[in-house]
Amino acid sequence: MENLNNQSNLEPSNGDAQPTAATINHIYLMPDNSLDQYNSWTEKITSLVHTASDQIRLKPIVDLLITAISPERIFIISYKGLPQHRINSYTEILVTLDDDEDVDEDLYLDFVKLAFSKHPDILVSLGGASEVRGYLQFGSPYHCSHFRNQFQVYSRKRSAITEMDQDQLDKLKAEADARFLAIFSKAQQLFSVADGLLKEENPDLGAFMLYQTLHLLYQSVINTFKGPIPETFSVAEYQKKAEEYLPIMARNNRLTHLLDRLEQACSLQGQHNYQNGKVSMELLSTDISILMNVCETAIKCKLSQFDSPSATFETKI
């Protein structure tokens, strides 16, 4: 709902600026005992107008979503890129739709695809408000780390998101981290075996091990935020689901097509074409190693979203 920008949205860049009347109309929180939070949110939405950075583009985009979709809430999380892996910064915009309205999500999705076709660094995700609330109450790691008051920039409701207390969030973060490492460590072990087989010029078994490594890598991402999913899913289905939870995996075109390239390389093995495909297998092994490093780094920063606002990094991966 992935996934990297130069400056996080956690720290308003112009907190002293006075919000305009139009800006205040975008937020309807009761300024009673939540006055500090109310002021924080008004400052954040105002900063989108005054910030001298790429985020200045986000204010009209938020206005467009409000006008066209009339959402219940909007959340923005910006992430910095990994230029060493040719991954640019990007921003996730999470939109919850009012369940009381006749919502045609497919129609909205078509609108979003068209409206943001020229903004590949902005990823917009839509979800029903009651569904999001249900996942928050259930303790879904993905929803509890993304749909947080600190990331909210627009609300049509007079109430804040009901979050778990920080102790509960810390426990959920630890559980999600353990779930990631449980499978990711197996992927690392398989990759080590695959790398050894390729160095020994055993391409058939080496290619198979790389394929299983990639399969486990996708599983590790899904398991972090959702838990186990049916084993009947194809590897391509695992990839699609993993990229929904960790969009950075799809930010480098070469890494995005890694599965297709690996399946093509595997089909050549056993046909005495290894010498012709040797360089290809070496590149595939290198790219899988890069993707594993990207995932490990990005998961750590995603999990930092469980932390209290004062402890969260100013920039994210």
Image (spheres, rainbow, N blue to C red):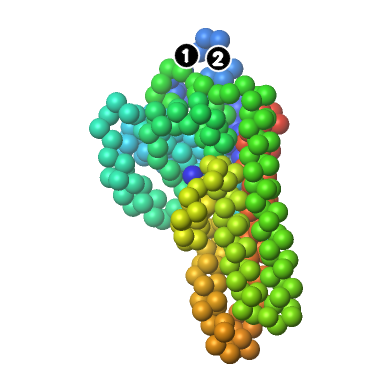
Is residue 43 at all visible to an observer of this figure? no
Residue at x 63%, y 39% (from the top left corner): 176
Residue at x 47%, y 41% (from the top left corner): 93
Measured in 3D between alpha carbons, the distance from the residue under mark 2 to the one under mark 1, in whole angstroms, is 7 Å
- The answer to whether the residue labelled 2 contacts the one labelled 1, judged by CB atoms less than 8 Å apart, is yes
| Label 2: few (<14), some (14–19) or many (≥20) C-alpha neighbours in 10 Å | few
Report x, y in % for residue 22. Answer: 41, 26
Q: Is residue 194 left or right of residue 122?
A: right
Residue 287 position (above or below residue 15): below
Q: Closer to the camera, 314 or 259? A: 259
Residue at x 65%, y 74% (from the top left corner): 206
Q: Closer to the camera, 13 or 276? A: 276
Q: Which residue is mark 1?
A: 30
SS class of the residue under badge 2?
loop
**Kind of residue indicated by mark 2:** Ser
Residue 1 position (above or below residue 311): below
Count of marks overlaid on the render:
2
Q: Closer to the camera, 12 or 173? A: 173
Residue at x 57%, y 88% (from the top left corner): 273
Report x, y in % for residue 289. Answer: 67, 64
Q: Closer to the camera, 18 or 193? A: 193
Q: In this view, which residue lies farthest toward the left?
A: 102
| Label 1: few (<14), some (14–19) or many (≥20) C-alpha neighbours in 10 Å | some
**Kind of residue indicated by mark 1:** Met
Residue 156 position (above or below residue 82): above
SS class of the residue under badge 1?
loop
Q: Which residue is mark 2?
A: 34
Q: Is residue 249 left or right of residue 193?
A: left
Report x, y in % for residue 72. Answer: 38, 28
